[in-house]
Image: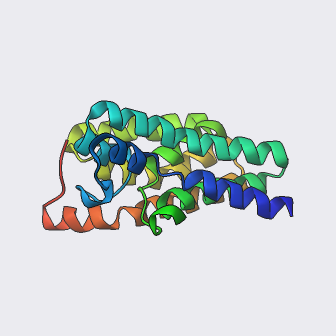
Amino acid sequence: MTQILVVIVAYLIGSIPFGYLIVRGKVGADIRETGSGGTGATNVSRRAGKVAGVVTLVLDALKGGAALLVAAKWTDSDWMITAAAIAVLVGHIFPVWLGFRGGKGVATGAGVFLLLAPFALLCAGVLFLAIVFLTRYVSVGSMIAAATIPLFVWLEMHSWPFLIAAAVCALLIVFAHRGNIGRLVQGTESRI
């Protein structure tokens, strides 16, 4: 029963749509009708300003960390912490409150890996910044950083549960960017 509860609570934490609520409160609009259609920090900053984007980034990252802290408090199983990491990301990308249309999962994933594998997150973060600096595409930096996080997690921890968490989270983040991939192919993706 505890295991099921951990997954449900992690999903519900992840599904809190901070970006949606911030934009709705500040400009009275649905963030999902702007730009990429996501509820994340980049899209929020385009619609409601940089401060709103930063607040969204921080709150979305805190969701990832909070889900892991709940899992760690209720269980000492690495597999249950892995399940919570995946569930919080699923909640962010597919929130029940917004008809399962949420964000891309990057900030929430960062919050997860800040607690789970901080050195891996640092490596992926440096790679993200370099890619964004070179290409000016946040989506490209996000996808490449996500795709490499399993490697960095393995190098840091050699933990099968956490490697699986990293791999599944990476797949979810890349899947959430499928619209961005289409726009990159068409040459219509927004640069910063």
Q: Residue furthest left?
A: 187
Pinpoint residue 151: horizontal percent, then vertical percent.
Answer: 54, 50
State which quadrant residue 155 falls in. top right
Can residue 95 be spotted in the picture? no
With 184 as the anchor, is 139 left or right in this view?
A: right
With 8 as the anchor, is 49 left or right in this view?
A: left
Pinpoint residue 72: horizontal percent, then vertical percent.
Answer: 78, 44
Pinpoint residue 46: horizontal percent, then vertical percent.
Answer: 23, 43
- Seen at 32% across and 59% down, the residue is 32
Quadrant in which the N terminus appears: bottom right
- Seen at 57% across and 34% down, the residue is 119
- Seen at 35% across and 48% down, the residue is 24
With 21 as the anchor, is 97 left or right in this view?
A: right
- State whether residue 166 is above or below residue 128: below
Pinpoint residue 55: horizontal percent, then vertical percent.
Answer: 41, 34
Colour scheme shown: rainbow
- State whether residue 141 is above or below residue 169: above
Can residue 143 be spotted in the picture? yes
Quadrant in which the C terminus appears: top left
With 123 as the anchor, is 26 left or right in this view?
A: left
State which quadrant residue 163 falls in. bottom right
Q: Nearer the viewer, residue 86 or 185?
A: 86
Q: Nearer the viewer, residue 16 or 112?
A: 16
Q: Nearer the viewer, residue 53 or 23?
A: 23
- Seen at 81% across and 42% down, the residue is 73
